[in-house]
Image (cartoon, rainbow, N blue to C red):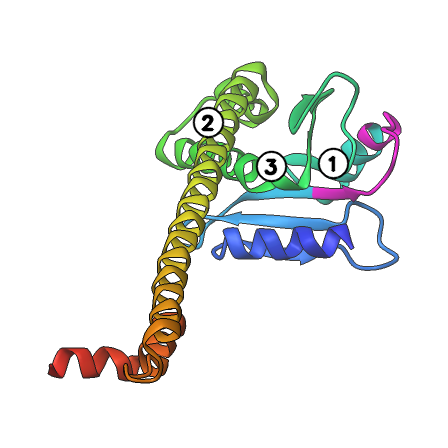
Amino acid sequence: MLELKLEEILRSAFPYDIIEPVGKGRKGGDVIQHVHSLSGEDCGAILWEAKRAKAWSDGWVSKLKQDRAEAGACIGIIVSTVLPNGYERFCSYDGIWVTDIHSVVGLATALRAGLLEVENTKRASVCKNEKMEMLFQYPQGPQFRQRVEAAVDAYLEMKQELESEKAMMARRWAKRDKMIEHAINGIAGMYGEMQGIIGLSIPELEKIEAKALAPATDEDSSESKEH
């Protein structure tokens, strides 16, 4: 199920946070993430809703807004197999964040950073009422949204580059493995031809062939070191 996969991803990526499923029969999202600083301070909550569907529904947004308020969460996020028309990977949509499952870590990382920043500012400053209100509204504002979008875009771009490098290295290793295999087969073929000409007067290459074709073992490594 999508919500179980979401829980697993969040717990793995954010070990300092408290990740809890919303109890069955209770209204309000699927997973709530209590964001904690390294010192264990509670810096706010993110309410997650998982949707596996073929078509997007704007009704999800209005419902999650209400659920977010009832849960006392700062941010609401819908993780969906389908995004609103015109959007890919993730977006801010009418005050609610929407993302696919692959962008969850990048988006959550950026949003957590914003919550931690707001909490640090609140603790470090003695603010007037209007400034406190500005801090509470900051995670919902356009400046915060732009910063998050830029951070997630950078994260996804770096992740894509890393995956491309991994694929390139895998292709290189496969090519080298093929070259080694061709070299060994060439030696074995040459030996077979010589054996056909000379007969059985040359020694068998079974041990050499076995060592060349079999993967290296710890025992082989220790023997080579002794010699």
Q: Which mark is residue 154?
A: 2
Which residue is denoted by mark 1 in the rendering?
69
- Using the rendered view, name the quadrant where residue 22 is placed: bottom right
Q: Position of residue 216 (x, y in %)?
A: 33, 74
First of labels 3, 2 by sequence position: 3
Q: Residue at x 56, y 39 (%)?
A: 108
Observer-side mark, 1 or 2, equals: 2
- Kindly report the distance in space between the C-alpha atoms of the residues bearing marks 3 and 1: 24 Å
> In the shown orientation, is residue 43 left or right of residue 195?
right
Q: Is residue 35 magenta?
A: no
Which residue is denoted by mark 3 in the rendering?
103
> In the shown orientation, is residue 193 left or right of residue 164?
left
Q: Is residue 57 magenta?
A: yes
> In the shown orientation, is residue 74 left or right of residue 114?
right
Q: Residue at x 80, y 45 (%)?
A: 28
**Segment colored magenta:** 48-61
Q: Position of residue 170 (x, y in %)?
A: 45, 48
Asked if 213 appears above or below 127 in the picture, the reply is: below
- Kindly report the distance in space between the C-alpha atoms of the residues bearing marks 1 and 2: 30 Å
Asked if 178 appears above or below 187 in the picture, the reply is: above
Q: Position of residue 208 (x, y in %)?
A: 31, 77
- Using the rendered view, name the quadrant where residue 61 is placed: top right
- Amino acid bearing label 2: Ala
Asked if 185 appears above or below 64 in the picture, the reply is: below
Q: Which mark is residue 128?
A: none
- CB contact under 8 Å: marks 1 and 2: no
Crowd rating for badge 1 (residues with CA inside 10 Å; few <14, some 14–19, many 20+): some
Observer-side mark, 3 or 1, equals: 3
Crowd rating for badge 2 (residues with CA inside 10 Å; few <14, some 14–19, many 20+): few
